[in-house]
Amino acid sequence: MTEFSGVKQPEFDTMTGRHAQAAGRLEELAQTLYGELQRAGLDTAPATRLRELAERVTTQAEDLRRRQRLVHELQRQKVTFGRSTPAGSFLEMPDRLEIAKGLLDGTLAGRAALKAADGDTKALAELQKYASRTGDAEFVKTFLGTLGARGVTRLPGSFATQLRDAMNREDSDRVGRLSTSGQKVLSMLATALAKGTNPKDSAYMGADFLKDLTKEGRAEHKSGDTTYSGYQAQALIWRAHDGKTPFPKAFMEVIGRDVIAYEHEQRKDQWAAGKDPLGRTFASAQIPIIDLAGALGLGTQLRPGTQAGVPGAKGGSSVVDDLFHAAKSSREASHTLLDHTPAGWKESVLDYLLTTRWGASLYLKDHAPFNDMLVTATTGQDATSQKLAAELTKIVADEVRGAFGKADDGNLEIRDREAFDRLAPLSYPVARAISANIDQLSRLLLNHATFGKVAAQDMSYALVLATSHDAGFEALVKAQTEHMRAALDTVAPVGLTASNAERLGFTKADVKKFDFDEDGRVDKADIKQFLIDRTVAEARPFSHIVEIRRQVLIAQGLNVKKVDESLKTMVRDAIGLLPVPGAKQIGELATGSFGNLVSTHYEKMAGAAYDEVAKQVARQMSEHGQGLDETHRMLANNRLAVERLAEQMLATAMLNKGLLDEFSLGKLAFTSGTPPILKPFAEMTSQEYSAFLVWARETGGSDDLLDRFMSTFRRTSEVDDYLDLQIPASIGGGT
């Protein structure tokens, strides 16, 4: 063992006692010497130095006494590690007291856990006292070492069978105690296991412990009259995980991947039989391996409240679903599980889960663990997240394509409702994956690029599924709104020249790029042309998202003229008003309008997630008791809502880039002071804000920008082409 010193027990006790005696004698000597020197009128410094020495020896003696008490307690509990040498028998004494404390508590907790697994209720109560110690690496290492892989597997199995017995006996008090205690202990085990299987953590138990867990997981265990596989019991630990100490990559590489392979081995013949005509008649359900709580009918009684499950689920859970729950708290863990092709397989784990195994995921109707893991794995900006997002998009597009076709009126229709319903649970994670890669939608539509193996038509079918989910549609619109705001922000400000380019965050090459008339200065005409180009480019993906959403609503027989509440909120709270965090330049009027938001906390949010920016904007507006825009009350559908958002963004972009700086404000409703300046947006009433938008359109020319946006946004030809439709021309402006 490391950080231990060898001591002989009798000699250590003698040394401790003599050290304490020496400290006392030194203190007495220092006092006597001080008195003698003072009476003789001599310098008392020697006595002072002697007293300091006495204090140091006293501190050392107190430390030795603490160690002595720990040694005695370790011996009493038989938590000692000895070795014999020619010089005598030595005890290994931890050099740091916290290590000794972890060694003692970890051993006692491990022993209590083993007793609790045998049904000892006093030991169970004792075990819960150590729940707060899982942050201590030495405790975790000793605790797991005492339990061993077999004990880790037996403990949840014992809880489950004891709880089933109490339920059978209708002993409600015992059921309550076991349920509460079981939740606490399983949470404790989950945290300990996450630390103990992480090579980067000082609590790491080593590769052999991981291998032992897989061995016990595949083995058959018995508790009372109940026989179960080890993974069925271990799964209860994973489902109790709170995510605060994420399960590491090593856990998913060894145990996670083995769990996927184990279920595949156990169920492949049964699942394959269910696909032939006879199997579809008599055994159509694709049943996964249920965890022990589900197998015993315990529902969610061994899950902490936050992990209880979702309404409508059957209450049980599969072993693999519990694994997904453990993986979702870490992007690295999720990647390790999904971005992998097992030896001998022709498909990746992600492909397998979305196709071969998907029926098993539908069986228990609790899609949250898998969906949450998918969101974690596909919404990062790293290469693996983007690869998985592309793979998810392509697989879903291929699977959902056959569910839709062209109706007699040219709109979208659902031809295979069962196929659509089977894939509907994936709609939200697909929407989030596309939202996290919203720039790829523009690349596909504008540049005929590909996203992995995803082409524009694939993306269109994936969007059919993604936009069918209300929250998914909201995420897509928010992401495209942010994309448009960022695109508009790339345009240079009025007045950019070679002399001020560096100060404004641009280069001399940028000056040449934006200076159309080549007069050495970027003027309003130059900026206006670039804003038109950006506006048209951003309108196309907006059109794709919103028109496909409209077609899905038509196919489902829903009200296509409705406006989603999320879009109403975005318009009301003026999402898109503020400059992109880290904006390079703000026009004079814009600085006044945004007040201190730009110079204080908003600029500090550079790089923050869109949702956080949106929350900050909404909070700023709501502090004044009302939203800026009441027009949302009259919005007829999502098209009008997005056009209203675009109007806000375009007016704000013109403000940011200085296109409105030279226009006289005069005494207008949305100005204040002498000379008049633009009121901060957060202080405008809805009427004043509407008046500002009118002024920006009529004075600054945003009418032209908005018209270019609307004419592109309302074209449906690309959706026609990619989904093979013939969308009827809109009657009136609303639909």
Image (tube, rainbow, N blue to C red):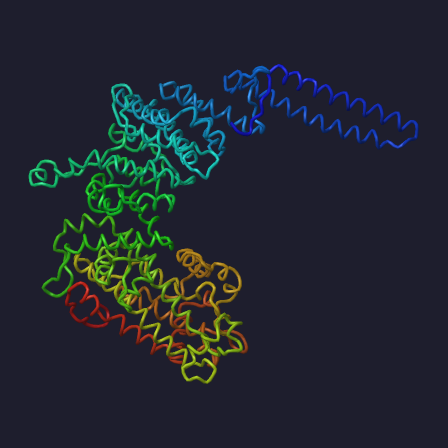
**Residue appearing at x 56%, y 17% in the figure:** 85
Q: Position of residue 213 (x, y in %)?
A: 34, 30
To which quarter of the image does residue 111 belong? top left
Residue 292 vs 487, above or below: the answer is above
Identify the image quadrant of residue 344: top left
Q: Position of residue 412 (x, y in %)?
A: 16, 61
Q: Is residue 423 above or below residue 34?
A: below
Q: In the rendered view of the protein, which quadrant contains the C terminus?
A: bottom left
Residue at x 38% of width, y 18% of height: 120
Query: Considering depth in this image, is 619 or 468 the residue closer to the camera?
Result: 468
Q: Is residue 540 left or right of residue 210?
A: left
Where is 70 relative to 622, above or below?
A: above
Q: Please give the count of numbered marks on the rendered protein.
A: 0
Query: Which of 26 and 115 lies nearest the eye of the viewer?
Result: 26
Q: Is residue 669 visible?
A: no
Side of 281 where 624 appears, left or right: right
* Residue 36 shown left or right of residue 51 in the figure: right
Q: Is residue 655 above or below residue 382?
A: below
Q: Is residue 358 visible?
A: yes
Report whether 461 appears left or right of 241.
left
Q: Position of residue 564 (x, y in %)?
A: 28, 59
Residue in front for this viewpoint, 241 or 150: 150
Which one is in front, 477 or 668? 477
| Residue 368 pos. (x, y %) | 29, 44
